[in-house]
Image (cartoon, grey):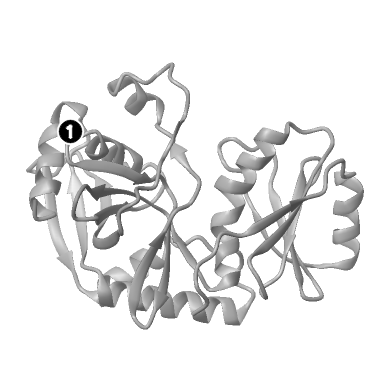
Amino acid sequence: MTPWTEPRIEWHRGTDSLRHYQYLVNGAELLTRWEPAPFEISPTDCFRLGDAFWIWQPGVGGIQFNAAEPAVNAFPSDSVDSAWFEHLIERSWMPAVYQAWGRQVLHASAVAEKGSGRVVAFTGPSGAGKSTMAYGLGQRPGWTHVADDTLAFSVDAGTIGLHPLKNDARLRPATAAYHGRSDAPLQPIAWPDDALSLSKLFVIAGDDAVAADAVIEPLTAPESYPLLLQQAHSFTLQIPAFNQQLMRDYLALTASVPVFRLTYRRSFDRMDAILDTVVKSAGR
């Protein structure tokens, strides 16, 4: 496994985005189309042209990269805000691009225990409560928030390594209101200096019918593997080598890290009790 390094980004500003998109449509292979994220206004197309891969939004711009090295060429349209375009790359596109370099990003939010460096992560589909759970636990003494929606990892000789990604705490309106952050700006998440290790993964789901505030059940590797694959950021499923690496890495993840199903009652009134259950399960 190639050591993890942050990708180098080279900027090429003032691009005629529509003209370049038509060039890709006419001459490149369309691999997949991503539907717009909540802060996007149009879908994103992914292409292959020779050894290069392209991610492009017409009228917005795009990026170009290859599988040989962690480097990206960025081409923002001259009509878009540069800060917004950088945010688009970091939050929407880069988590999927890492797959091309044999590194994985799980759709998960996470906290680390101060002192021990043990990381507890929450994964599940959009709206499951990952950010709510991680942000709430990260506000408690002894814990720090380390990832929101994107948890990067690599596998080296069966060992799971965690890596920082640029992200911020993005809370849904109800969660932001509960924490008194409705009018607050986005909070960048700082990666701690301590060595971190992933100690537990929770696949979470809200269920108003659950009898207790939270129910935690261990999952076997065969049970957890397909659940985690569903939450893997992936550039495309059209490149067999990428997919094989992804599947091997997630097999290593399920073999190395205990995975649990966390079913909880959706109620901010019970959030402290829910987090108490999580902390107890985490061994604190």
Instruction: Tell me what residue is drawn at x 58 percent, y 71 percent.
Output: 101
Q: Is residue 56 visible?
A: no
Q: Is residue 201 visible?
A: yes
Res 207 quadrant in image: top left
Q: Is residue 161 left or right of residue 31?
A: left
Could you say where residue 155 lies in the image, as x and y percent from the top left?
A: 40, 75
The correct choice, above or below, for 246 with respect to 91 in the image is: below
The correct choice, above or below, for 25 with respect to 254 in the image is: above
Query: What crowding class fits label 1: few (fewer than 14 Cα within 10 Å), some (14-19), or many (20 or more)?
Result: some
Q: Is residue 266 left or right of residue 68?
A: left
Could you say where residue 164 lies in the image, as x and y percent from the top left?
A: 44, 54
Which residue is identified by label 1? 271
Q: Amino acid at mark 1?
A: Met
Q: Is residue 46 left or right of residue 211?
A: right
Under circle 1, the secondary element is helix
Instruction: Tell me what residue is drawn at x 17 percent, y 41 percent.
Output: 142
Exactly how many numbered labels are in the figure? 1
In the displayed image of the protein, which residue is found farthest to the front? 193
